[in-house]
Image: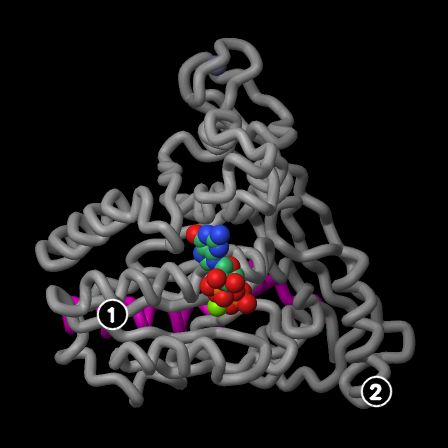
């Protein structure tokens, strides 16, 4: 017998993502899915963001890594609630893994939840986690070719944090070229050059968060 | 890459459906895989062979996976030019505006399966 299905392969993931989205919406939690290659600076950016914004917002973090609690521990040292997901070889977070962490949070007590995805510039972009926003981090040492070479990531995110601009004088990365390349893939996306190390440019990122949070309250 | 996990999802989808129809063994699965879907056809085929070996009772001996590849294609919302996006998905090659939208290439579906 032949059976026609025409079913999205990611159906199971998308059901879980909708469940998350519904909960985040009901509890007015702003959820930001942060994705990048390994070492682009996701955890460092989150550390700096928590230091800067923890007086204003109650922040929670889900940390996705292949193994270890290292990144969650870095966040906990700042006094923020962090839950580590270990994917044991899995190259991305999926929405079901996020569902499994939900009982550990009291979302009435959280304003902003950051989800740090597994370091990987390809696979995480394909998985809806139920977030409000998807943000990519790209870092100067990775080179100019990454935006055209990994179009899936940049067409599915709305903001690119270009991190480690303190290293621009030593490397041949060209910011204008990166902006042009991004426009070619996703004209709706914005590139913010910044450095989590020197704080240069971080205020634009904090303003973006403020706006996103206000929009989240209104929806 | 994560084709083993994706194949697990695919089997989960067809097994759930097959249960309601009393189908116990599969002889063919048809997928459509978009160029921008983050899944590689060759790796999916390999994953299928591994699942088949590990779950022999679920498949007929000559059970096969068929993949229809969906190319990435953009269309300009202004001048309606249809083009292969290369890595500049949104730049229209005719009017040079950032007005191209993907119209194909992201699909990733189980089209059908066969079994008894
Ligand atoms: N020079 C410079 N180094 C930075 C900056 N931000 C982060 N780093 C360094 O980059 C390295 C990696 O940073 P992480 O924050 O651990 O990167 P990550 O993206 O969380 O890495 P994974 O979780 O392993 O994918 C660390 O040594 C940081 O100190 C920056 O703005 N400038
Ligand atoms: Mg990290
Ligand atoms: Zn055009």
Separation of residues labelled 1 and 2 (CA atoms): 40 Å
Q: Secondary structure at mark 2?
A: helix
Residue appearing at x 46%, y 12% in the figure = B79
Quadrant (top left, top right, bottom left, bottom right) of the C terminus of chain A: bottom left
Q: Could you say where residue A189 lies in the image, as x and y percent from the top left? A: 38, 37
Q: Is residue A154 above or below residue A215?
A: above
Closer to the camera in the image, A56 or A120: A56
Q: Could you say where residue B55 lies in the image, as x and y percent from the top left? A: 79, 87
Residue appearing at x 66%, y 67% in the figure = B2
Q: Which residue is mark 1?
A: A22
Quadrant for residue B28, please give it: bottom right
Residue appearing at x 36%, y 40% in the figure = A192
Q: Residue B56 — which label? A: 2
Quadrant for residue B59, please give it: bottom right
Disc number lying in front (1 or 2): 1
Whether B32 is among the magenta residues is no
Residue stretch in magenta: A1-28
Is residue A215 visible from the viewing direction of this image? yes
Q: Secondary structure at mark 1?
A: helix
Quadrant (top left, top right, bottom left, bottom right) of the N terminus of chain A: bottom right
Q: Could you say where residue B77 lies in the image, as x and y percent from the top left? A: 42, 21
Closer to the camera in the image, A126 or A19: A126
Residue A156 left/right relative to B21:
left
């Amino acid at each position: 017998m032949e059976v026609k299905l025409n079913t999205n392969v990611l159906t199971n993931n998308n059901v879980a993502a909708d469940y998350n989205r519904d909960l985040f919406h009901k509890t007015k939690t702003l959820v930001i899915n942060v994705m990048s290659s390994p070492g682009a600076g996701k955890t460092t950016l989150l550390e700096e963001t928590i230091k800067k914004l923890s007086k204003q917002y109650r922040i929670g973090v889900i940390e996705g890594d292949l193994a270890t609690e290292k990144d969650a521990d870095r966040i906990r040292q700042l006094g923020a609630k962090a839950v580590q997901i270990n994917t044991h070889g899995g190259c991305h977070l999926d929405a079901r893994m996020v569902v499994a962490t939900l009982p550990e949070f009291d979302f009435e007590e959280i304003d902003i939840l950051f989800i740090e995805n597994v370091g990987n510039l390809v696979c995480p972009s394909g998985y809806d986690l139920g977030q409000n926003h998807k943000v990519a981090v790209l870092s100067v040492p990775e080179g100019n070719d990454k935006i055209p070479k990994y179009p899936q990531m940049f067409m599915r995110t709305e903001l690119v944090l270009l991190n480690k601009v303190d290293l621009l004088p030593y490397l041949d990365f060209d910011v204008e070229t990166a902006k042009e390349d991004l426009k070619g893939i996703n004209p709706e996306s914005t590139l913010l050059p910044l450095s989590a190390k020197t704080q240069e440019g971080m205020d634009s990122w904090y303003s973006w968060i403020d706006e996103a949070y206000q929009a989240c309250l209104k929806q | 890459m994560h084709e083993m996990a994706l194949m697990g999802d695919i089997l989960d989808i067809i097994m759930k459906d097959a249960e309601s129809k009393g189908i116990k063994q599969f002889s063919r699965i048809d997928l459509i895989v978009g160029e921008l879907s983050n899944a590689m056809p060759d790796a999916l085929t390999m994953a299928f062979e591994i699942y088949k070996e590990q779950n022999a009772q679920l498949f007929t001996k000559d059970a096969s996976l068929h993949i229809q590849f969906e190319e990435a294609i953009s269309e300009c919302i202004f001048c309606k030019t249809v083009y292969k996006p290369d890595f500049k998905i949104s730049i229209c090659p005719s009017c040079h505006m950032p007005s191209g939208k993907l119209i194909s290439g992201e699909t990733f579906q189980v089209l059908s399966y066969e079994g008894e």
